Each structure stands twice: as structure tokens, then as C-alpha cells.
Amino acid sequence: MILSNIAILDAIERGALKIEHLAGRDPSASPFNTTAVDLQLGTEILVPKSDQPLALDLRKKGISSFLHQHSTTYRISEDQPFTLRKGTFVLGNTMEKVGFPLLTDEQCYSGRVEGKSSLARCGILVHFTAPTIHAGFTGTITLEMINLSENDFLLYPGMFVCQLIVEEVKGYPTGAPNQFIGQTKPAGVIK
């Protein structure tokens, strides 16, 4: 079941869901939609290097470390946005830190991250393959972004770049390993 804007805010107030800076906000105003919360782009863009004679092999552990070592990081600001060029793939992350606590005495939640239609209509795909945010996750959300349009597109911090849909989890999950819990950078947790 997908939570409404009012139910999302209620879950935040009860501590069953954490989304930075939303407690006490008006659920009928931005960044809320009727069944989602818009999230903002953070201040780092990670561009995987394309000049490496490497083939990615996910059987080997440590995708976060690999990306960190084989990417260029750009810090962006209002005055210095990142120009996402045609056909370019980058990683970013949300400004907001989210948390889906594993609770035994209360309803647990998970989430899905989806792109925004306003960006899709410009040819920008955001978070296009791995939308699930599992119960037990805490951290910023890494966003996979690519420009499929014929035009350059500016990415700047604070722009609403995706939407978080919150769902109820049936039953009480037990913790499970996840290499991205606690991430604060686009590459994930560096070990």
C-alpha cells in the first residue's frame, strides 16, 4: 500500500520514517505530492571515467570503491551547475538523508524512487533501474542519471530531481546485509 502525503508526514512524526527537514511541514505544499515526496539533488556529481580499459565485473565485491577510484567528482553550486551533455551518464545523490527503521512494535516502511516527469520530458532519466529503498536503509539516495535529449541540461543542487514513494511492509523484516546502508556520497559507502 502506498502512503498518502498525510500518512507520510504521520510516519515521520512517529519516527517510523525519516526524511530530513520534513517534520512539521504542510503535506498539501511542496515538496509533497498526494502520494510522494519530491527530493532534491545534492552537491556532488560523480562521472565514471570512460578512458579506462576495464570491464565491470559485479561478481567482485566493492562497486562503491571501484566507482570512487575510477570516477571524477564534481562539486556543484547555484553558481556552478553541472552541464549534463547528450548521452552522458552520471551519479548524484539526494540532499535529504532518509531512514526506514526496522521496527518490531510498529509498521515498517520501504520506498521507491522514481524520476520526475518534468525532467523526463526534457530527456533526462533519473534513477532508471533500481527504485527500491529497502526497510532498514538509512542514508542519502544515489541517483543514476543520463541525458537522452539533444540538448545540454543543467544540474544544480537543491533542484527537485526525483520523488520518493513510501510503501507499507507486510510483516516485520529482519536485518539483511546491504552494501549501501549509511551512504552519503554518490558512489556509496567506501570500505
Image (cartoon, grey):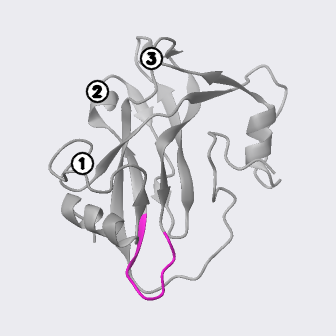
Toward which corner of the image does residue 10 lie, by quadrant?
bottom left
* Disc marking residue 78: 3
Question: Which residue is found at the position 43% from the left and 16% from the top?
Answer: 154
109 falls in the magenta region: yes
Disc 2: which residue: 121
First in sequence: mark 3 or mark 2? 3
* Disc marking residue 68: none
The CA distance from mark 1 to mark 3 is 23 Å
Q: Nearer the viewer, residue 104 or 22?
A: 22
Left or right of 13 in this view: 30: left
Three-letter amino acid code of the residue under disc 3 = Glu
150 falls in the magenta region: no
Q: Is residue 82 above or below residue 43?
A: above
Disc 1: which residue: 32
Check if mark 3's residue and mark 2's residue have beta carbons within 8 Å: no
* Crowdedness near tag 3: few (<14), some (14–19) or many (≥20) residues, C-alpha within 10 Å: few
Three-letter amino acid code of the residue under disc 1 = Phe
Left or right of 38 in this view: 103: right
Check if mark 1's residue and mark 3's residue have beta carbons within 8 Å: no
* Crowdedness near tag 2: few (<14), some (14–19) or many (≥20) residues, C-alpha within 10 Å: few
Question: Which residue is found at the position 33% from the left and 56% from the top?
Answer: 165
Q: At numbered mark 3, what does the secondary structure look like: helix, strand or loop?
A: loop
**Magenta residues, as a range?**
101-110
From the image, state whether disc 3 or disc 2 is nearer to you: 3
Q: At numbered mark 1, what does the secondary structure look like: helix, strand or loop?
A: loop
The CA distance from mark 2 to mark 1 is 20 Å
Toward which corner of the image does residue 186 lie, by quadrant?
top right
Q: Nearer the viewer, residue 54 or 119?
A: 119
* Crowdedness near tag 1: few (<14), some (14–19) or many (≥20) residues, C-alpha within 10 Å: many
Three-letter amino acid code of the residue under disc 2 = Arg
Question: Which residue is found at the position 27% from the left and 30% from the top?
Answer: 118
